Amino acid sequence: MTSTSAAAAAHATVHGYPRQGQHRELKKAIEGYWKGRVGADALRGTAAELRRGNWQQLAEAGVHEVPTGDFSYYDHVLDTSVMLGAIPARHRAAVAADPLDGYFAMARGTQDVAPLEMTKWFDTNYHYLVPELGPDTVFAADSAKQVAELTEALGLGLSARPVLVGPVTYLLLAKPAPGVAAGFDPLTLLDRLLPVYAEVLADLRAAGADWVQLDEPALVQDRSPAVLNAAARAYRDLGTLGDRPRLLVASYFDRLGEALPVLAKAPVDGLALDFTGAAAGNLGDLAAVGGLPGKRLVAGVVNGRNVWINDFEKSLATLGTLLGLADRVDVSSSCSLLHVPLDAAAERDIDPQIARWLAFARQKTAEVVTLARGLAQGTGSIAAELAANRADLSSRAGSALTHDPAVRARAAAVTDADGRRSQPYAERAAAQRAHLGLPLLPTTTIGSFPQTAELRTARADLRAGRIDTAGYEERIKTEIRDVLGFQEKAGIDVLVHGEPERNDMVQYFAEQLTGYLATQHGWVQSYGTRYVRPPILAGDISRPEPMTVRWTTYAQSLTDRPVKGMLTGPVTMLAWSFVRDDQPLGDTARQVALALRDEVNDLETAGSSVIQVDEPALRETLPLRTAGHAEYLAWATEAFRLTTSGVRPDTQIHTHMCYAEFGDILQAIDALDADVISLEAARSHMQVAGELATAGYPREVGPGVYDIHSPRVPDVDEATALLRKGLGAIPAERLWVNPDCGLKTRGWPEVRAALENLVAAAREIRGGLPGPWLMGAANGAGCSRGTRPAPGRASRRT
């Protein structure tokens, strides 16, 4: 096929679509089901209606081939485990008794059975449920979900392409099941797994599938020859099956690199490649391997992970080059549109001029269709769209929002000294212990407490004008008093105010910083029924006035125990926003760090002795290929230190991370120079404590003992067992006791019980430890809970 005929055949498609619905109907139906208010049939009906609506919207927009199988009640990797029969032994009875309830038990756990571990999907903020596999795992095909959804779409008269997680990526994402001997590699199960994929493909072919997409994003990471050989074997076996659908192998988020020639040579029918951002190098790599003669190429030229409009002329130039490299070139998003909100047109409060710069899932779909038409029919067919696109791009580049001279001058003046504490950690630790007088194994929480229906109602009433600001603030004060009262009664040592005034840990700050935009309807799935509205970082960043000082100071006035000041760190402010793409990320991080530095310093001046700057996204933002690690970690750790290094030695800086693989950034965690770090550890069975010990991490650590992403309440024995495991790696004088993460999504009954058990476990172990009960006593403090100095700044300096 010539390049001209390849262009004439160009069609539009996407890899996947947001699941939740315009008004988060799926979230409401699932949570209603959990609470017994929605029946299983009603839940399934809502899901079917949402799928049908998505497909019809795509088809009406001009998408030629809609994706199926990407819809999920909780997570598509968990769906894959179900499809493959990879059900953990502890969940098999529940799944057999009721597949839907068993599915949710795997995701969330029950009081008696722990859920699957959860972690980040590559370098996104989406969380997946980690498959648990072992040498005794027996796979068995269950194609019911995938066949049913394909049948639904075909029944609407649509051309449909089922989308599955590929076998190599599935195994690379898996971990050894509990109790499996160390060193087991799930990839050794490939030969056992491939016949099950073959059976699923046969079922889909029988149901009418012409094409099936197998997603292999794990292959964009640095992979060993053994992994590349496994990929070659997998697609040799699947590609040479008999009566099968045509196979499209998809990869995204970065360059395929050394995996590209493996897949290009495989006997599959097409590849779907990302050509945006870090993956732009796929263009040159594809030319270097001689293209894809005889195969289909689905070109991801519309970025599926950000919210900025596409540069049509740049994308058309890329597509034009690709025409000579494959027999057929179709146009697509770079990855599933799961990672962006649904519809920018729903945002009525954003300046219309700025709104022209934005593209959510529906707008990105329209961009894909426009580019496909331009590729197939020539640029004359989209002349009006090209002109409007040029005008919108020019408007953004020339906006005062994107260039603030004062912000840029301050960032340019930063020196190395601005990112260093005035004393080394050992001296700071002695000063902090002497001042705070905390016991061994001090207890704390991560920050947020349950966001009750009353709080959400009060926030909605304020927006709607049903209550005034004074009434709303009185409600916040009542909540803070209640949260502090519970913590003191429970015996928690370092308190938090509970963050009742905060809608989200990033959005709350973004709404008070210049350069950020907030959306009203820009919901994106983080995990399960947890949806967030990432703010849009559109311009240069500064802090007009204090953001948290008022409520933290109020909370501290109610107690003599230290109350942590709570901020979100600069890397997480970037990672959990839709960040600008018109300057290096490190430059943006420095601007955000300087704004947060002002807040940290003001908190200290107001009396905060303990300040936590959360960086849960430090690991997830790590580039997928090691070649980019050093540069990223340099600016990321500098941004954290720039935020926190302006305080006095006896002010204790905490940070927090959760639900990521930390083992390969331990040096960077050390480079943050935080005094205390708290991390997720309950679902991963204290793995991170051992990793920190092996790396020689010298500071204080709080590995979580309460998994807050599950409704189950750990009892005292369970928390004690986890703490003893933590003590096997971290000495008692450096070990903190805390949950895995914030408590915002949990209900008060389970939070009360879990935290009381956590405190009881700490006391039980503390009572059996030798040496002084107070950490401060070892440094000459010798003060007790009743006589230690109050943590407020004024009392410290009198």
Image (cartoon, rainbow, N blue to C red):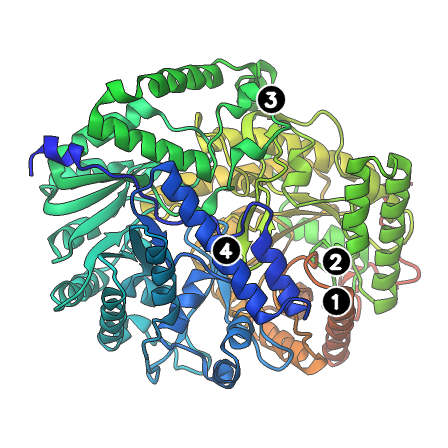
Of the pair 29 and 108, the residue shown nearer to us: 29
Count of residue discs: 4
Marked residue nearer the N-terminal end (3 or 1) = 3
Do tag 2 and tag 1 residues touch (Cβ < 8 Å)?
A: yes
The quarter of the image holding the C terminus is top right
551 sits to left or right of 390: right
Q: Give me the C-alpha separation between circle 3 and circle 4.
A: 33 Å
**Mark 2 crowd level (few <14, some 14–19, many ≥20, 10 Å Cα):** some
**Image disc number at residue 450:** 2
Marked residue nearer the N-terminal end (4 or 1) = 4
Marked residue nearer the N-terminal end (2 or 4) = 4
Q: Which residue is mark 4?
A: 49
Q: Which residue is mark 3?
A: 351
The quarter of the image holding the N terminus is top left
- Label 1: element kind: helix
Name the amino acid, label 3.
Asp
Above or below for 338 versus 683: above
Q: Which residue is mark 1?
A: 751
Q: Nearer the viewer, mark 2 or mark 4?
A: 4
Marked residue nearer the N-terminal end (2 or 1) = 2
Of the pair 303 and 372, the residue shown nearer to us: 372
249 sits to left or right of 681: left
Q: Image point 40% across, 81% down: which residue?
A: 180
Name the amino acid, label 1.
Val
Q: Give me the C-alpha separation between circle 3 and circle 1.
A: 41 Å
**Image disc number at residue 737:** none
- Label 2: element kind: loop
Q: Give me the C-alpha separation between circle 2 and circle 4.
A: 32 Å
**Mark 1 crowd level (few <14, some 14–19, many ≥20, 10 Å Cα):** many
Marked residue nearer the N-terminal end (3 or 2) = 3
